[in-house]
Amino acid sequence: MIPLTQLFSLSGKVALITGASSGIGQLIAITLAEAGAAVVLVARNPDRLEAAASAIRTSGGRAQTLACDVGRRDELDRLAGRARGCFGDPDILVSAAGINPRPLVEDITPETWDGVMAVNLDAPFFLAQRLAPAMRARGWGRIINVSSQQAVRAFNNSGAYGVSKGAVSAMTRSLAEAWSRDGVTCNAIAPGYVPTGMTRLVFDGGEREREAAALTLAGRNGTLEDLRGITVFLASRASDYVTGQTIFVDGGMCAH
């Protein structure tokens, strides 16, 4: 029997995290580094990336950065090769980058639609496609996508975003079907309301924040801290027999 300290340890593993300069992506990068992984932080802004990586190094972790706009296919194509030059081939891929411009459905332009799909759906798929062969060759890998409540319920003015996140959960199942027999699992995390740049309109200390909390069974909104446990679980050997799942970390919001 594997000791629990080893079951949840990420020592010797390499993780690549998109959207890692802020919010959920940054929290995940910090968490994986604390669990022992060498982390490669990916986002568009190099200064914010370096600040996040520096904080990880100060805490004793190993971190490098790669500035990349994952919504651009040409940059995405080069990212996998650049990632190998940091700590070697990634064992863990976390796709946390996402955008939600929030126009009315009738005002969504083809450019807006394509932009949302490029970042939220295309990037996780094509990056997984490029990194999975090395994982499969080693017989072990973890792909973790960040989905959303909007994979299962509609929110105001989030038509393109909601569609993209529903597709992320479907894609997660498809990748799990394709690669789990080779030891590469694929799962998604669907957070409830947690304070990030994308949810700043909710966390106003007023009625919106109280209404969001009332949608949960726990009676409160989430914190980034609430995502740490599920992150380590899905990235480690502890989740060897869990694949194809979208796990809602939402205080029971989706069950309300």
Image (cartoon, rainbow, N blue to C red):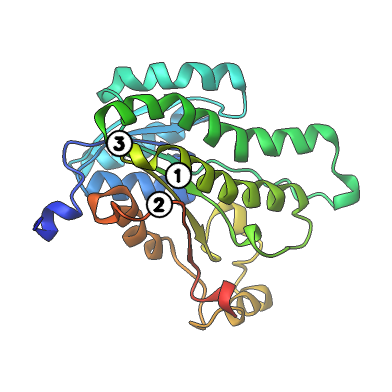
Which residue is rendered at x = 13% and y = 60% of the image?
4
**In the rendering, at what x and y percent does residue 68 appear?**
51, 25
Q: Which residue is mark 3?
A: 54
Q: Secondary structure at mark 3?
A: helix
Looking at the rendered image, the quarter that the C terminus falls into is bottom right
Looking at the rendered image, the quarter that the N terminus falls into is bottom left
Instruction: State the count of labels.
Output: 3
**In the rendering, at what x and y percent does residue 252 appear?**
51, 76
Pick whichever of labels 2 and 3 is earlier in the sequence.
Answer: 3
Mark 2 burial class by Cα count in 10 Å: few <14, some 14-19, many 20+:
many
Between marks 1 and 3 in the image, the one whose residue lies nearer the viewer: 1
Please give left or right for residue 184 compared with residue 187 in the image: left
User: Residue type at mark 2?
Assistant: Thr
Q: Which residue is mark 1?
A: 176
Mark 1 burial class by Cα count in 10 Å: few <14, some 14-19, many 20+:
many
Above or below, comparing residue 30 to residue 191 in the picture: above
Is residue 142 among the parts visible in the rendering?
Answer: no
Between marks 2 and 3 in the image, the one whose residue lies nearer the viewer: 2
Q: Which residue is mark 2?
A: 243
Which residue is rendered at x = 39% and y = 17% of the image?
82
Contact, mark 1 vs mark 2 (Cβ under 8 Å): yes
